[in-house]
């Protein structure tokens, strides 16, 4: 079972964000996010949707286990479609570029 608060920390660290930056990007207040951890609360679905939108992922992706299938966002589908037209060398360069972001 997914630990929601740990999963938020995981994605936040993947972005290199502080709780404050997550708050800014999600439209939630920092005090709301901090209270989840202080009081060991699970965010509401609407709040979790805002967090997922900030991370650029779907709720399905948030809750998926490593081997689970999940749904891609429209922008992720477009990225994959366009990347499919690149040569292997171009794809390698694109992956390297994404890793530097």
Image: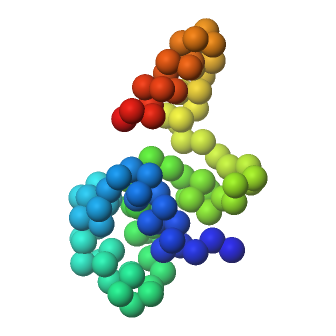
Q: Quadrant of the N terminus?
A: bottom right
Q: Where does residue 36 sit, x and y in percent of width and height?
A: 39, 81
- Picture layout, residue 85 above or below residue 55: above
Depth check: give the residue in front, 100 or 54: 100
Q: Where does residue 41 sit, x and y in percent of width and height?
A: 44, 85
Q: Residue at x 43, y 25 (%)?
A: 97
Q: Say left or right for 64 vs 31.
A: right
Depth check: give the residue in front, 39 or 74: 39
- Picture layout, residue 11 above or below residue 80: below
Residue 28 visible in this rendered orientation of the protein: yes
Q: Say left or right for 81 vs 25.
A: right
Q: Where does residue 21 sit, x and y in percent of width and height?
A: 26, 58
Display colour scheme? rainbow
Q: Where does residue 31 sit, x and y in percent of width and height?
A: 24, 78
How many numbered marks appear? 0
- Picture layout, residue 48 above or below residue 44: above
Depth check: give the residue in front, 60 or 87: 87
Q: Say left or right for 36 vs 68.
A: left
Q: Residue at x 37, y 35 (%)?
A: 101
Q: Residue furthest bottom?
A: 39
Residue 82 visible in this rendered orientation of the protein: no
Q: Say left or right for 97 vs 32.
A: right
Depth check: give the residue in front, 101 or 81: 101
Q: Residue at x 54, y 41 (%)?
A: 73
The quarter of the displayed image where residue 84 is located:
top right
The quarter of the displayed image where residue 12 is located:
bottom left
- Picture layout, residue 2 above or below residue 55: below
């Amino acid at each position: 079972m997914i630990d929601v608060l740990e999963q938020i920390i995981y994605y936040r660290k993947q972005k290199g964000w502080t709780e404050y930056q997550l708050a800014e990007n999600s439209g939630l207040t920092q005090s709301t996010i901090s209270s989840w951890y202080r009081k060991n609360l699970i965010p509401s679905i609407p709040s979790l949707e805002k967090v997922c939108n900030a991370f650029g992922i779907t709720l399905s992706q948030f809750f998926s286990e490593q081997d689970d299938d999940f749904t891609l966002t429209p922008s992720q589908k477009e990225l994959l479609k366009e990347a499919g037209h690149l040569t292997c060398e171009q794809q390698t360069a694109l992956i390297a570029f994404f890793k530097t972001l």
